[in-house]
Image (cartoon, coloured by chain):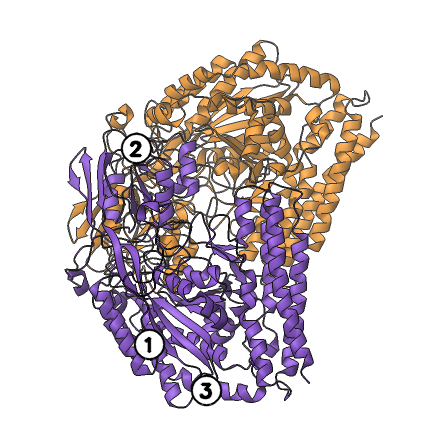
Chain colours: A orange, B purple
């Protein structure tokens, strides 16, 4: 489900120059261990190869493999086999979730002024054998409502909250109309939510050539961009929790399993959309938009089709949209490989990507899957050569992410307690290798790990490192790479926002045939990334990070970033609140953030002094690492967010209005979005308590290290 | 020739809050005279009516009236008759200039892969009777070279200097090719100049729907925007002087007149283009651009046609372009009306607009013409009622502006000495009334006159003044309206940049059918400005300014603006030069500008103290006013600019690389554009000398006023 370029997050924070010490020594490593690690990393960097990645990718993407389909089970079998061969233990925890079983029946046609069925499936292309596969499906939006509407049409731009407000201001009613909106600007589920709230009878979502088609570059098969028949599929689920709709907070364990889970009935779920929703390409959209006759749109609403866009279709243009989408209980399974740590097997570094796809999924998600399998091969080879990681490295392949981040969420809910004890960090790699532009977003404590790893990985076909290339693209090169803050939209969400495991997402991207039948191996091989170099490159970055996390004496979190980033985000929140409540001040929280900054600085100074001390015993390390491992849990707040109690991190969330954007300090941001002050005292108390929990942990660490001789 | 929105200039300067005194008292008026003036202005504001403006506009735009055509003589006759009826003396000074006599023969067609003639004329529209006029001509570019080329094509975006440099960087040769470039980004003549310099065999210029067509709003006849057959005509003359090509610096007096003028032979003129050039609409452009097969363009080069634009057409696509455009000696005439001043008939306030049009010229130029005739009616009526202006007000209708600002330039060259003695200011109104958005650009000394005038004129259909509306649109309302600096592109150029008469341009605009056959009365009446309210509104602003200039005891220039604006522009120039010559400093000139600021402040303080003094005799006033009148001449430099000696103002010029943009301190800007330092010492000496001339005049004024008891 990860949207292209989603790694960057939306709240880009710029990282300053690293202190020189960081470029010379690895944080958390003693001098002796560091030289071993560097030797080991050198050997590791030789292992991931384009050919390996390419072979995995070809095997993974032979068929369309929607969650719940037999083809998807074949993909799971391949991954299990591949990881076992590499030396991983593999488990396949299953869940039964409430899911559409397929697109069902979709009918879309102009009724007047001419009767004309509209195309809802990609063209078959001579050049692309995958496009001829009889198992490809029409474009569809999972969790659409069922219905059959014939009505006039209204154009709603991107269908954001603001767009529907603008329509109302312009005096355009969508009541009883079929809304046509373009992809972009928000998570597609919110287009359905706002259209339905405004009284629409149905919703058609299309990709505009200005956003992803011919105006951006040559269309497939000549180029990488959307052609007129390319359709973005996608879920429109927008509940106030993530995961299986019937089992909020709890794992959707198999219906036929030993442990029974309480389930809602589908009709008890609050927030399913009831109107029919379906996606189309711009060729079909042109037939509707080009026949509209109302007033012209505001200038920023104009797209790239060759006529002036209009707000209303008028009475002479009517469209029929019928969706009958069956839903039921569907078996899904995650595929989890474990390379057990030689010294601390109960401290886990988890890497993951989903593997279920809308169709073939060559970039989204399986470029990430193939990269993870390539990495598993390399780590297995290292282990065979006697370089097994000290901590456990888990490689997880999630199911049913495309329908609403379901597989990973159920797993997090199932193993919440174990993850709390064992989970160090989660690295997400959804569709992570689809082009040559590197980007990443991370929790504060992981930012320096990511930046440092990119400094030792060569950038393909150049003399640069990945870091050099990343800096090159930055808005201001002197500030270093633009590293994002992590929000919603993929499998890190459960780890990060629900249970407080520091997470990151990184990869190499470019334009893709996102969620269409053309996101296949032919696209990848002919126009997408014909050299297959992003796969091994990302595998190296991910591997270096995992190995450093696994082998360091002290888990290499950068604690100093907490204070710095908190101050930045508190400043933003204060400004937003002051705009309507001028007396508001975040001073108290700011002061606490400054204390955190000082404590973290003291910790890093102490750590560099004591890391080589013989007084630092394994027992000390265990306590230090257990404390570090639990650091981010300080942000977990039992009450959760006002817009959804499942969202428990006071630090980070997805945007509850658009789905994709990163919300930092979401409690405060949500209050600001309501222009309310009522909850501010309660929120401040909860934030201060979280900061205090963080400080307590830092104090404990400093005390422990202070005691070391 | 004035491009839409050209009044604003490109170098927008923001005007701060006016000191309160300015809003209470009229500069240059004694208390007694001021109350008379305010009474008179009140009466004046009642006179200009929409109906008058509409009638004039209808009469002026009955036929296509290209310079040199019998129809244009009929327009001149109408203006003469109208101004005589209003009580003006009228003269029609004639010139014989070297001009295309019409579009001649134009052939444009695809040759391969299909033979297809392309449309070069607007569609006939049922809704628009003017479109059926048999005298409308095809689209053409005057001063095109003659030739017949059949060649492959290259797309050159806007055809700017930078665009052709980019093509070369991308390895695309235009040698022997036909270039297709879109309108916008520069004066069209420079597209031809750079295409020819790069070796092109011909040039086709089209209007892209992204810039002026359906992507901006509904197309004519439903809306105001360019339709697929709408063609922008226009001159491509780019010599290094302005005016008749055969008589640089001298008036092109009639061949059969008493006074003979030396003329170049056409073949002696340096800088005529030799390649064929012709304009088309986006319907025809689509046939070419849509068949191209080369590499895709850089993202910013993409326009609004429904496919990815490409750099090259490839060998399978060939286009034929033939232009055979006859040129010869053509008789033109300006029509100059004078309302003689009652007290100072030899001090002239000149208002003008050209009257020659590409076709009917409803907005460009004749909305300005109709406005000036409406103003003449009002001023004549005032005179009949005993309120004749004290200084002379001249209303000038220029011929042949469309081909290169020819009529006004020849007049300035003919009456250079008299204008030096008598010319106070020139107000330009080219196509000044085509919409509801007010804007203006002015010489520093006229900026406050324009701003103050807009404060007493009501904005149509509202409770606001024109000033209020103007502020409303400003980027930052607290800074007041965005008032531009004046550059090239219309008839103020000779007055301002050649002989140093302070000039301004102001009007009310919006989208128009610029230089097309649809710029006609039907467009104006149905979609353009159906209420005809901009005409009388602009007439009021222009009239208030003229009356204040005419009736004040002391010419109401704002001298303080010289120092302020000079410092701003010196800062910009210094920055541009420092970018390649870090040691450069404009300190000396800055200091002189500060002196000018102080002298001007002293003058305005003295003036407000002495204006009501009985010691201020008429003889004193004559000297004060003569000195003020000559103030701007201080910038005139006999050597002229390095890119063209005809451009004599050290203060303002048009941009020699793009034609339209305003260049402030053009001597320094040109040196900066060459990244040269060789001429900086000479330039600094000339600038300091000009500043000294300004200071000398200010010192003289202060001395004179200081002597008044």
Chain of the residue under the numbered disc 3 shown in the image: B
Task: For marks 3 and 1, give the CA distance.
Answer: 25 Å
How many marks the image carries: the answer is: 3
Front residue of this view, candidates A605 and A353:
A605
Q: Do labels 2 and 1 share a chain?
A: yes
Q: Quadrant of the C terminus of chain A?
A: top right
Tag 3 and tag 1 share a subunit: yes
* Residue position for label 1: B90
Circle on res. B40: 3
Q: Distance between the residues labelled 2 and 1?
A: 52 Å
Can the viewer see residue A209 in this picture?
A: yes
User: Going 59% across and 45% down the picture, which residue do you hit?
Assistant: B577
Mark closer to the chain start, 3 or 2: 3
Q: Are marks 3 and 2 in contact (CB under 8 Å)?
A: no
- Measured as percent of width and height from the top left, residue A100 is found at 34, 38
Residue B488 falls in which quadrant of the image? Answer: bottom left
Q: Which chain carries label 1?
A: B
Quadrant assignment, res A449: top right
Can you give x and y, in whole percent of width and height, for residue A102 in the image? 30, 36
């Amino acid at each position: 489900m990860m949207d292209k370029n989603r790694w960057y997050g939306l709240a880009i924070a710029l990282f300053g120059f690293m202190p020189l010490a960081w470029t010379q020594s690895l944080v958390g490593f003693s001098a002796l261990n560091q030289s071993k690690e560097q030797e080991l990393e050198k050997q590791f960097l030789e292992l991931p190869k384009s050919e390996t990645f390419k072979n995995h990718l070809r095997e993974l993407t032979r068929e369309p493999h929607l969650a719940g389909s037999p083809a998807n089970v074949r993909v799971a079998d391949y991954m299990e086999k591949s990881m076992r061969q590499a030396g991983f233990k593999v488990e396949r925890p299953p869940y039964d979730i409430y899911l559409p079983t397929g697109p069902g029946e979709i009918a879309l046609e102009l009724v007047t002024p001419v009767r004309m069925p509209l195309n809802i499936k990609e063209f078959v292309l001579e050049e692309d054998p995958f496009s001829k596969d009889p198992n490809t499906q029409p474009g569809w939006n999972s969790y659409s409502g069922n219905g059959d509407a014939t009505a006039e049409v209204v154009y709603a731009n991107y269908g954001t909250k603001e767009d529907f407000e603008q329509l109302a201001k312009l005096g355009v009613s969508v009541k009883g109309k079929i809304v046509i909106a373009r992809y972009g600007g928000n998570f597609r589920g919110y287009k359905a939510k706002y259209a339905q709230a405004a009284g629409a009878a149905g919703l058609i979502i299309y990709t505009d050539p200005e956003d992803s088609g011919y105006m951006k570059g040559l269309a497939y098969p000549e180029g990488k961009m959307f052609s007129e028949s390319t359709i973005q599929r996608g879920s429109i689920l927008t509940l106030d929790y993530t995961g299986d709709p019937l089992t909020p907070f709890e794992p959707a364990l198999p219906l036929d399993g030993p442990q029974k889970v309480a389930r809602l009935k589908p009709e008890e779920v609050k927030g399913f959309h009831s109107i029919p929703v379906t996606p189309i390409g711009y060729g079909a959209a042109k037939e509707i938009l080009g026949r509209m006759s109302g007033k012209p749109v505001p200038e920023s609403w104009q797209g790239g089709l060759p006529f002036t866009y209009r707000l209303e279709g008028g009475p002479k243009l009517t469209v029929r949209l019928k969706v009958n989408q069956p839903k039921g209980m569907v078996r899904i399974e995650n595929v989890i490989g474990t390379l057990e740590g030689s010294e601390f097997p109960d401290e886990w570094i988890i890497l993951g990507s989903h593997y279920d796809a809308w169709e073939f999924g060559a970039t989204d998600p399986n470029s990430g899957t193939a990269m993870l399998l390539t990495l598993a091969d390399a780590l297995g080879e290292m282990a065979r050569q006697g370089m097994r990681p000290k901590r456990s490295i888990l490689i997880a392949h999630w199911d049913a992410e495309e329908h609403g981040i379901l597989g990973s969420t159920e797993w997090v809910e199932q193993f919440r307690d174990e993850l709390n004890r064992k989970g160090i960090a989660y690295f997400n790699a959804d569709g992570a290798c689809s082009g040559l532009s590197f980007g990443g977003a991370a929790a504060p404590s992981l930012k320096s790990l990511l930046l440092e790893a990119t400094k030792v990985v060569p950038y393909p076909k150049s003399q640069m490192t990945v870091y050099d290339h990343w800096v090159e693209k930055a808005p201001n090169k002197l500030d270093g790479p633009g590293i994002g803050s992590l929000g919603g939209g993929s499998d890190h969400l459960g780890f990060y926002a629900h249970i407080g495991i520091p997470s990151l997402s990184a990869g190499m991207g470019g334009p893709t045939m996102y969620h269409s039948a053309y996101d296949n191996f032919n696209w990848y091989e002919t126009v997408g990334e014909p050299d297959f170099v992003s796969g091994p490159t990302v595998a190296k970055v991910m591997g270096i990070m995992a190995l450093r996390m696994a082998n360091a004496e002290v888990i290499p979190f950068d604690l100093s970033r907490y204070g710095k980033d908190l101050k930045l985000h508190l400043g933003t929140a204060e400004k937003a609140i002051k705009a309507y409540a001028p007396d508001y001040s975040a001073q108290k929280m700011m002061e606490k953030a400054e204390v955190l900054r000082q404590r973290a600085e003291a910790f890093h100074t102490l750590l560099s002094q004591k890391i080589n001390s013989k007084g630092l015993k394994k027992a000390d390390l265990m306590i230090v690492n257990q404390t570090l491992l639990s650091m981010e849990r300080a942000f977990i707040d039992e009450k959760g967010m006002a817009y959804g109690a499942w969202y428990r991190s006071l630090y980070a969330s997805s945007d509850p209005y658009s789905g994709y954007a990163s919300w930092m300090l979401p409690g405060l941001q949500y209050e600001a979005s309501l222009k309310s002050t009522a909850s501010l005292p309660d929120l401040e108390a909860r934030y201060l308590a979280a900061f205090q929990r963080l400080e307590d942990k830092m104090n404990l660490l400093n005390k422990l290290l202070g005691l070391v001789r």
